[in-house]
Amino acid sequence: MSNSYKCPHCGAVTAIFTLPIISRLKPAITHGNALKRLSLARQDDSLDIEDVAEILDPAQTKITRCQACGGLIFWDYYEIKYPIPRGIEPAKDMPKEALKEFCEAQSVIALSPRSACVLLRVCLEKLADYVAQTCGVPDYKPEAMLWEKIKFLGEKRGITSDIKEICDACRDTGNEFAHKGKYDLSESDTRELAEIMSELTNSLVDLWVKPAAKVARIRQLIPAKKR
């Protein structure tokens, strides 16, 4: 296990600070066992927690405290079980129309990465609708299939091949779990897919959505007769 980790409470990278978990208290010190019990004490004559209680093996179960926010984290065999880990933060310029689905996907990515993939597909569709509406794309049909929307925007707005590949990859991944799957994916594969899809969705905001909004704003500020 690494000597540091990302706190699921505050997101800060913090050093491991382990708190012992008591499994059972040892018998109380009595006149009969006093000398034996005190012989277990440290050389400075102070009793440690191991002298009065049995501790769970920290390699199996442990509690750590974040040194940044003070939050407690429960681990089981080096995996965080509490609090439930979240995914990544949304891109700074994520449109509010798609923000809810993105954040919801990140909140369940550890519990159900398949659900996260479906939510991210919805997020992608809302990003496409946002671009079309912001740029005033004529004849755009919000009720069309997602692949049709991507193709139409590619034809009307000149989507680059890189952006189209990202859109298609996210759409295909979401479809795999929104509809009957065609591939046999393990749970570990699914978590990785959800994480990659989250990163790609953020990339779409930076590479596609944000520039489209900036262009639309320029069109508003500069009258057509002056272009």
Image (cartoon, rainbow, N blue to C red):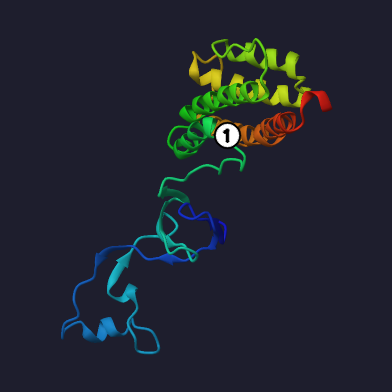
User: Residue 63: where, in percent of width, then height?
Assistant: 40, 59
Q: Quadrant of residue 42?
A: bottom left
Q: Which residue is mark 1?
A: 95
Position of 122 with respect to 153 (left or right) is left
Quadrant where the C terminus sits is: top right
Position of 199 with respect to 98 (left or right) is right
Above or below — where is 44 with respect to 14? below
Q: Is residue 227 visible?
A: no
Q: Is residue 113 visible?
A: yes
Above or below — where is 62 with respect to 136? below
Quadrant where the N terminus sits is: bottom right
Residue at the extreme bottom: 44
Give amino acid for label 1.
Pro
Q: Residue at x 20, y 80 (%)?
A: 29
User: Residue 189: where, in percent of width, then height?
Assistant: 56, 30
**Around disc 1, counting alpha carbons within 10 Å, would you say few (fewer than 14), some (14 to 19), or many (20 or more)?**
some
What element does badge 1 sit on? Answer: loop
